Image: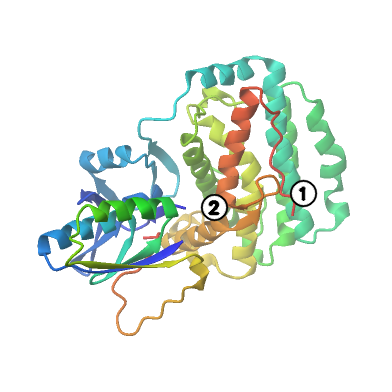
Amino acid sequence: MYVIVTYDITDDKRLNKVRKVLKKYLYWCQLSTFEGEISEGKLEKCKSEIFDIINFEEDSIYFFEVKNPKNIVKKVIGIEKNYMDNIL
Amino acid sequence: MARRFYINSNGRIRRKENTLYFEREIDGEIEKKALPINDIDSIYIFGEININTKALNFLAQNDIPLHIFNYYGYYSGSFLPRKKNVSGSLIVEQVKHHIDNQKRQYLAISFIEGAVYHILRNLRKNGINKDDYQDIEKELFPKIFKTKTPEELMAIEGNIRDKYYQLFNKIIENENFYIEKRDKRPPSNPINALISFGNTLMYNTVLTEIYRTQLEPTISYLHSPQEKRFSLSLDLAEIFKPFIVDPIIFSLINNQVISLNDFDTDLNYAYLNEEGRKKFLKAYEEKLAKTIKHRKLKRKVSYKQLIRLECYKLIKHFIEDEDYKPFKAWW
């Protein structure tokens, strides 16, 4: 499935930790946003890693999950910050 | 679902914050690209890359093979992390099937049977007149089942391949890419370069899949295992070369995606240049990601997964669970 993750984290230290976890699974796309294709199992693993870090009172993380990646159309206005390309 | 990464440019691979970073210099500035470690299946390197042990250790931890190719796109070697799926008893069975001539021949014939099936399928699908390939179908194909040694089999396979490559000229709609004869080391013209490059990719994709199973990649049946290569991947690739690589070549040429500009002119067009490689890799990726509904598994399976399934079928054959039947595209 395809997932887009956005986050708002008040504390910089936690923010960096969350960012590092997300980076292992998904592609950075712009500030506070990650995206990418991921299996359900790996996504659960990713979430559980994040659960251990964040403060549930202050932080918020949104997961937009799309079961069928074909249903997603990405349109970019302005500069695209990061290409998800596997032929470098 | 993890992806293969093909690195064509020059730069450096490093480990940072538990991800792999690929850094390259563009207009004097260093561009960093994070490759999420959990989304990497294997890495193919065509450019000039610096890598240190820290990064290699990290790849090993995550079971990611790294394949390296030289300037001309020839395979030079792989970094295969320590195998975690090992099974001594399976290796014993694999060897047993190798030393018993009859058992070895059974497998060798199966691989060729799969290959020829797809060769004929290609010809049929590309609208070649039935009379043109009748001798392959009616004469040579039945012969392979009567062979007693892998050498005999290889000779007939060679004849089939010759005939097959002759028919390439009828499929290809661009005379720049006509094939006179198939040769490698070095390939003498563009079409040979395309075939060689595609086959190389195929070997390494198969090797990556074998690596993920308990099979021992050096013990082979059709090819002699003394070749100092991972010859089991050559065996299995026989089936998939005409199924995956050849149709890519036809479509790249006939849809005018690839032209003579995509070859290295200095070397008589015998090697793909960076642009050409990228185009080929893109088509290859799309092909491997294609899915079909598997009849037995009753779910969607990608072409890449078909290769893995082929490995599992071999394992089942070795442990005498189910006889090996080569994969034949049924659609």
Pointers 2 and 1 within a single chain: yes
Amino acid of disc 1: Leu
Considering every residue shown, the one lying at the far front of the view is: A57
**In-image side of B69 versus B257 (left or right):** left
Q: Which of marks 2 and 1 is nearer the N terminus?
A: 1
Q: Where is residue B312 in the image (x, y as percent from the top left)?
A: 58, 35
Considering every residue shown, the one lying at the far bottom of the view is: A77
Hey, which quadrant is residue B96 in on the image? top right
Q: How crowded is mark 2: few (under 14 residues within 10 Å), some or many (20 or more)?
A: many
Q: Give the Cα separation between the discs numbered 2 and 1.
A: 22 Å
Q: Is residue A84 above or below residue B223?
A: below
Q: Mark 1 lies on which chain?
A: B
Q: Do the residues labelled 2 and 1 touch (CB within 8 Å)?
A: no
| Residue occupying the point 21% across, 59% down | A18
| Residue occupying the point 82% across, 26% down | B146
| Quadrant that contains the C terminus of chain A | bottom left
Q: Which chain carries label 2?
A: B
| Residue occupying the point 54% across, 52% down | B193
Query: Disc 2 marks which residue?
Result: B193
Q: Is residue B88 above or below residue B199?
A: above
| Circle number at residue B120 | 1
Closer to the camera in the image, B220 or A37: A37
Amino acid of disc 2: Ala
Mark 2 or 1, closer to the camera: 1
**In-image side of B11 versus B162 (left or right):** left
Closer to the camera in the image, A19 or B64: A19
Q: Position of residue B172 (x, y in %)?
A: 69, 62
Closer to the camera in the image, A36 or B200: A36
Label 1 residue SS: helix
Colour pattern of the rendering: rainbow
Label 2 residue SS: helix
